[in-house]
Image (cartoon, rainbow, N blue to C red):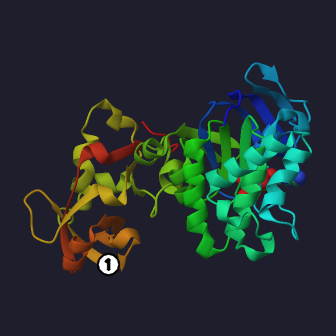
Amino acid sequence: MESPLFDIKLNNLTKKFDSFTAVNNINFTIPKSSVTVLLGPSGCGKTTLMRMIAGLEKPTSGSIFFEEHEVTRVSTRRRNLGMVFQYPVIYRGTSVKRNLELPLLSEGLEKQVINDRVHKVAELLGISDSLNKLVEELDNGTRQKIAVGRAIAREPNIILFDEPITNIDINSKLELKRSLKELFGRLSQTIVYVTHDQTEAMTLADQIALMQDGVITQCAPPSEIYSKPGNQFAGWFLGNPGMNFIDKKHLTKTDSTVGAPTLFSQTLRVGARARDVAVLGIRAESVSVSTKEVSGAKPARVLRKSLGIGGQYLLDLDYAGLVIKVRVSHAMGREVSDKVWTTVDSDNISLFDENGVVV
Ligand code: ATP
């Protein structure tokens, strides 16, 4: 769909509710024509940030620009946005087609233009066969698609999504996520998408802006934020399970009967950076596991074995009191009994300082 494309620029943006700071001095640019997912736990300020972009919430201080135009005090209506919320905003008792037409009729567009747009949007969302159905006949995932259609039919410059999948029933969730992914690939508008669900963010985002306590702590494409978390919070919040963290105290312990201290000590010898390291981070799939003794590999006891997502196994490995979670393939997992030998490639270890920031 053709629309002018906008960067969204946030300058020193702050929102306070009485003495509570929900959004704390954010300086950030949301690049035009990309899908930026605001991800974070409940209460971190992502909805408040989105509502300020929408003009539904007034910043306490700071400014918002759409390209070079300041919109901080411009009304929602004049910001030319499409919005999709947690619950589908649709008219009951009317057809899908009518639902898609209504926002266009209020724009005063010609009949033929409206008809073309409705069919284009229905095609984009894969609901062309349902145009004449009443919305009551559809599951709530499809109703949410109609709400999305209503938001994009006007061809706004920016489209905002606030947890659109969260309240959709489990059977429709996957299909809705798949359709949104496809839709985002075909739209050229700037898209901002709020969710607390890291899997959803990993699937849909061009870039994930991770939020904690009212600030954006890291912004990067999904694969980068996953493999190179900028802080421990990112390592913990992304991934299922989150990253393993190993405190420095485990690294200096000199217990020759166990693997843990020496398993990772090699990493700490890598360069001067080691001086600042307080914690090591290791992803569950970064540990290589063997069921047979391998020279140089460290032994661990298998505390627990469970079938994880994608048919892989998750193991809880015990290195004399230090427990880390490890992911292995289905075939390997089936062979695992109570003892394994492990190695970690030092390239796959994140190093954090005492403030949890990557070094
Ligand atoms: P959630 O997914 O739970 O909504 P969120 O990251 O979107 O989380 P916000 O809704 O932006 O978080 O809320 C951030 C903080 O600001 C929360 O502690 C919330 O209680 C507070 N807050 C939000 N709106 C208001 C309001 N109108 N009045 C007072 N406090 C508010």
Determine the image quadrant of residue 80: top right
Residue plotted at (70% across, 66% down) = 130
Q: Secondary structure at mark 1?
A: strand
Name the residue carrying label 1. 303
Q: Quadrant of ligand 1?
A: bottom right
Residue plotted at (32% across, 59% down) = 285
Residue 154 relative to residue 37: left or right = right
**Residue positioned most to the left:** 295
Determine the image quadrant of residue 266: top left
For label 1, being within 8 Å of ligand 1 is answered no
* Most foreground residue, 30 or 124: 124
Q: Amino acid at mark 1?
A: Leu
Q: Is residue 44 visible?
A: no
Residue 53: percent from left, percent from top? 79, 38
Residue plotted at (90% across, 40% down) = 107
Residue 337: percent from left, percent from top? 21, 81
- Image position of 330 with respect to 12: above or below: below
Determine the image quadrant of residue 170: bottom right
Residue 62: percent from left, percent from top? 81, 28
Residue 272 relative to residue 237: left or right = left
**Residue positioned most to the front:** 112
Total marks drawn? 1
Quadrant where the C terminus sits is top left
Residue 321: percent from left, percent from top? 33, 70
- Image position of 239 with respect to 332: above or below: above
Residue plotted at (26% across, 60% down) = 260
* Most foreground residue, 183 or 34: 183
**Residue positioned most to the top:** 68
Q: Residues within 10 Å of mark 1 (few under 14, many from 20)?
A: some
Q: Is residue 153 visible?
A: yes
Quadrant where the N terminus sits is top right
